[in-house]
Image (tube, rainbow, N blue to C red):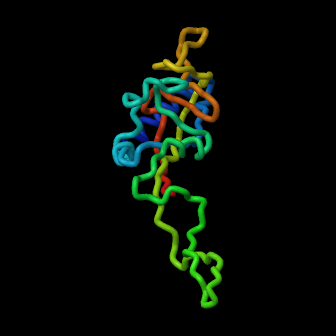
Amino acid sequence: NETSRMWYYLKREHIALKNGGDPNEQTLFHGSKTNSYKVIIQEGLDHRVANLGGSIGAGIYFGQESTISESYVPYNNNMFQHPNLMFLNPMYPNHRGKKRSHQPYNHPPPPATRQMLMCRVVLGSCVPGQGGLRRPPQKNDGELHDSVSGPGMFVVFENTQSYPEYLIHF
């Protein structure tokens, strides 16, 4: 969405100006419910629907590693639920009554079953977060920090601080 991208770049420049020229831009991951991606791609991420009980604040969460965001991506009810298992043929007795070893199927595994976003995120001045935050804490000069962090995670409190760049299917 070109409008979301424009607002993101304007916010990035604003944060860079207030932080000595460094916007602290990162590529991070965001996991969500499968039915949310269409709206997110059209409208952008929205902090107004954030979980108020989040562990480091009520904002938009991003994982530094995809495995962190993956835990927020549900499986559909009818999906194969263990991506690390090899697809095997059932064990058939051979003509002597002994069981054959498993052989991989000749057809490809099921199509991608989950989705996740790879986003550009401008973190600016980032400090450790805590539960109950609805905005970043204040700096000593009275201005607000731009984001908060926790173990492997970051939270922003303004929609224009992130731009979903890729939808990953896995």
Residue 68 appears at what percent x and percent y?
58, 41
| Any part of residue 140 in sight | yes
Taking the view exactly as shown, the residue that stands out farthest to the top is: 141
Residue at figure coordinates x 53%, y 20% from the top left: 131
Residue at figure coordinates x 46%, y 52% from the top left: 115
Q: Is residue 22 above or below residue 78?
A: above
Closest to the observer, 150 or 164: 150
| Any part of residue 1 in sight | no
Residue at figure coordinates x 50%, y 29% from the top left: 156
Q: Is residue 149 above or below residue 63?
A: above
Residue 101 appears at what percent x and percent y?
65, 77
Q: Is residue 102 above or below residue 162?
A: below
Residue at figure coordinates x 51%, y 34% from the top left: 61
Q: Quadrant of residue 20?
A: top right
Closest to the observer, 15 or 114: 114
Closest to the observer, 77 or 137: 77
Residue 1 appears at what percent x and percent y?
38, 46
In screen coordinates, is 94 left or right of 43?
right
In screen coordinates, is 21 left or right of 76?
right
Residue 113 appears at what percent x and percent y?
46, 58
In screen coordinates, is 3 left or right of 96?
left
Taking the view exactly as shown, the residue that stands out farthest to the bottom is: 95
Number of labelled discs? Answer: 0
Q: Quadrant of residue 105?
A: bottom right
Closest to the observer, 134 or 72: 72
